[in-house]
Amino acid sequence: MLSDDQMKKNDLFKPRRSDLILIAILAAAAALLAVLFAFGKGHEQGTYAEVVLNGQSYGIYDLKEDQTIRIETDLGYNLIEIQNGSVSMKEADCPDQYCVSKGAVSSSADPIVCLPHRLVIQILPDKTEPVSFDAVSE
Amino acid sequence: MARRVAAAGIFAALALVCSYVESFIPFHFGVPGIKLGLANIVVVTALYFLPVPEVCFVMFLKILISGLLFGNLMSLIYSFAGGILSLAVMMILNKTGWFSVLGVSAAGGVCHNIGQIAAAMLVTGVPVIAYYLPVLMGAGILTGCLIGLVSGRILKILKDHFSFSNS
Amino acid sequence: MKKAVLAFLIICACLSVGCGKQSDMVRKDPEISQPQIEETDPSEPTSRDLFAMDTFMTLTAYGENALQALDAAEDEILRLDELLSTGKEESEIFRLNQDGEGTLSEESAYLYERSLEVNELTDGAFDPMIYPLMQAWGFTTHEYAVPAPEELAGLLELVDLSAVSYSDKDHHISFEKNKMEIDFGGIAKGYTSARVVSILKEQGINHAVISLGGNVQVLGTKPDGSLWKVAIRDPENVSGFIGVVQVSDKAVITSGGYERYFEENGKVYHHILDPKTGYPAETGLLSVTIVSEDGTLADGLSTALYVMGLELAETLWRENRDLFEAVFVTDSGKLYITEGLEKEFLTDRYPVNVIR
């Protein structure tokens, strides 16, 4: 809410240079985050998908085994499909359908999120490569 | 007083119409949270046209009713988190007088998405969702600018026809 | 100008919402980054293998004084073997078990008091008086046999700490029942590894890893400043591992039925006896690994928690979370870790259940 005075002195409706600077800073921040995430850790192909419901692990599924998983809660249902080493949301009765349109994923950096149903499918980073160790406790 | 209530009511109704219109537009990116947010045109315009309590009222009503009509309870929580953060930031930026409606709206768009992501991380307990942040921030800038430009035009027209002073 | 500064601060505040979450995102990442310590000693590891305490031991130390330090450590191991062995006729424990009374040396008294401590902590699941039972099953001599129920009932009478009188002033100990016998075997290796580590430290060693027949204890970090990686044996497939725990200055000690067992009439009997029943503990656990700064405690607890079972072990951990962390493998193939190991435990065995 502005006074008439303010309106006359300063036309707040006309784009100014300071706007462009602000927008540039915001864009730079987004780009910086994108770069940080892209070069950050955790971008691995995985062989297991974890379904997280309400912040709790619902189940872990082997991506090598083709299967469909149906999850029904009070909020609605989701039909998860695992095929050819990747996982996708085949069907859901959520209002936005973002999770379905996401398609198939197989990278730990690329979760499928169904926010309306509080459900997330994330690929667990693969750690099956032999790990070196210094001693064996047995 | 009556005029203020009436103005707030009109703005809230306009926001709902915008939400309704937008629900017809198939606009899916496979990333939750990205949408045009036509109704935000009304909110941004209200920011310059109505006193603070009324702006908050319009925002609150817009989120509540459009959430109930076109979303579900969960999306309501995310919308509120985004809405509150974006409105707060827009009000503060506006108060500085340093930016025009374009900059204010762009920052509001980004903060709307940041608020949503933060709420989603809390609710789902899956921090990996933060990977969406850069994309959502970029989308927030684009839609925020678009809304800022449109709101700027609307405000210019309104300025010629209505008084901005307290009445 | 003030307004510009204000606006900038607001933008920064908004962005920091995003940045602050980054640390959470790498929660499941295997690489635990460590502060880089300057490489003071890039020299090669020095190792020593030896047989003592009825097992095979490997000591590895880094440092200029490593050779001398390992000599001192070996001497200490042989000394403790003499002192604590229940089988060697000249050992203090052997004589005590023969006579039914005696005065404990400073060191034995310490071990007895630690045994009592673990016994109380675990509500009797660890018992230093279990030796007669171990003999009856043949686990001390490798001549295995399932004792008759009447024999076990009689021997259980002897597993009775309340029938031991001990004075913590003059360290005099006596057994009130005939044929009672004591054995520090349940904590001896943990105590020995703790002693070895402190001797290496005294000798100026900063980085070492020792394994006393699978009882692992590490000193400091690796020379490059990274954490030691200790693999944990898979009880179901003894050529494999269930995962790796990353530690510094910790003992990592595992107890499992797979370590020593025999079969009779198609039934498997393992060496971890329940002091309350006299039979091998069947609690649904296949192995228990304890991670603790206190090697003696870790050794005693690994056996005791195996006897207690997962449920009681969880409760015990919740009441003593500052003392130790643990890894459990159940007979249904499930893996449980305590909260403190969430970041330090690496595995490809999903899911990992975290006890909080």
Image (cartoon, coloured by chain):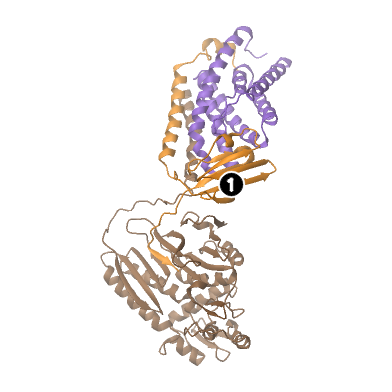
Chain colours: A orange, B purple, C brown
Residue C106 lies left or right of residue A77; in this view the side is left
- Tell me where residue C286 appears, x and y as whole percent: 54, 68
- Tell me where residue C8 appears, x and y as whole percent: 46, 28
Q: Is residue A32 above or below residue A8?
A: below
Residue at 41% from the left image edge and 35% from the top image edge: A35
**Residue A35 is at least partly visible in this image:** yes
Quadrant for the N terminus of chain A, please. top right
Q: Nearer the viewer, residue B8 or B124?
A: B124
Residue A135 lies left or right of residue B55; in this view the side is left
Residue at 67% from the left image edge and 34% from the top image edge: B72
Q: Nearer the viewer, residue A19 or A66?
A: A66
Chain of the residue displaying label 1:
A
**Residue A55 is at least partly visible in this image:** no
Query: What secondary structure is marked by label 1?
Result: strand
- Tell me where residue C220 appears, x and y as whole percent: 37, 61
- Tell me where residue C267 appears, x and y as whole percent: 57, 77
Q: Nearer the viewer, residue C65 or C222?
A: C222
Q: Which residue is mark 1?
A: A52
Q: Is residue A37 above or below residue C185?
A: above
Q: Amino acid at mark 1?
A: Val
Residue C334: image quadrant is bottom right
Residue B47 lies left or right of residue A126; in this view the side is right
Q: How many marks?
A: 1
